[in-house]
Image: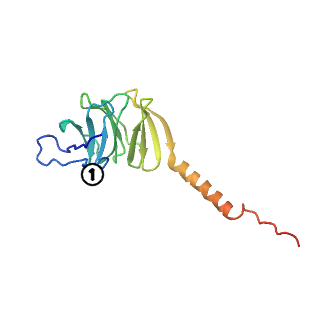
Amino acid sequence: MSVLSVLLACKGEPHARPLVTAQPDVVCAPWLEAMSPDGAGRVAVAAGAEVRVVATADCRCLFILEGHAAAVTAVAFSPHAAHTLVTAGEDRTFKVWDLEAGTLVYQSSILCAASLTAVSIDPEYPRAAIGAADGVVRFFDLATSACACVQTINLGVKLRGALAAAAAAAAVDEGGGGQETPKPKP
């Protein structure tokens, strides 16, 4: 990919700042970005509680998406419908946006006590995995307008269990299997 320079501000605003540096794969914090998968030349850039969708060809701001009550922490385009963008944030909600119309099509309720930190969309099925700071990942069906939660996995509990089992196994190995080694008889 060639050097990409995307502007945070819409064309014509006096305080435009570069978001992506001249170095490949280096994004200036505290911004997040995602490229549209369809080759349409759009990038979604989150800064604070708003997301700007920018055309990469001319750095024109296509949409400013507002609605999160706190900082947006994750953005992802759908590989199934490139005009669909999913955002998640510190307000503990996720939102589904239609970028053809620039409108909000779904807003979740508050999902948990922890901030939402990650969004990933399944490349085979229209469902999103929404991760939270508490280690819980929830899977939502994007094929319907209700965006129903279809599965919840508490990775924090599973990870703590696996680490405890590994620590116990290591302790047994260090202690000779937990048994005394018999001494040879003279």
Q: Which residue is at a point 40% across and 39% down the rendered structure image?
A: 120
Q: Which residue is at a point 38% across and 49% down the rendered structure image?
A: 115
* Quadrant of the drawing holding the C terminus: bottom right
Q: Quadrant of residue 52?
A: top left
Residue 149: where, in percent of width, then height? Answer: 45, 34
User: Compared with residue 78, is residue 28 higher up or lower down, i.e. above or below?
Assistant: below
Q: Which residue is at a point 27% across and 39% down the rendered structure image?
A: 44
Q: Looking at the image, which is closer to me, 69 or 133?
A: 133
Q: Which residue is at a point 78% across and 66% down the rendered structure image?
A: 181
Residue 46: where, in percent of width, then height? Answer: 27, 44
* Quadrant of the drawing holding the N terminus: top left
Question: Which residue appears farthest toward the front when viewing the image?
Answer: 2
Question: Which residue appears farthest toward the top when viewing the image?
Answer: 144
Residue assigned mark 1: 28
Q: In which quarter of the image is residue 138?
A: top left
* Dot 1 crowding, Cα within 10 Å, few <14, some 14–19, many 20+: few
Residue 113: where, in percent of width, then height? Answer: 41, 49
Q: What element carries label 1?
A: loop
Give the number of callouts.
1
Q: Looking at the image, which is closer to me, 127 or 180?
A: 180
Say left or right for 46 vs 140. Answer: left
Question: Which residue appears farthest toward the right when viewing the image?
Answer: 186
Q: How is the image coloured?
A: rainbow
Amino acid carrying mark 1 in the image: Cys
Residue 117: where, in percent of width, then height? Answer: 38, 47
Say left or right for 58 vs 90. Answer: left
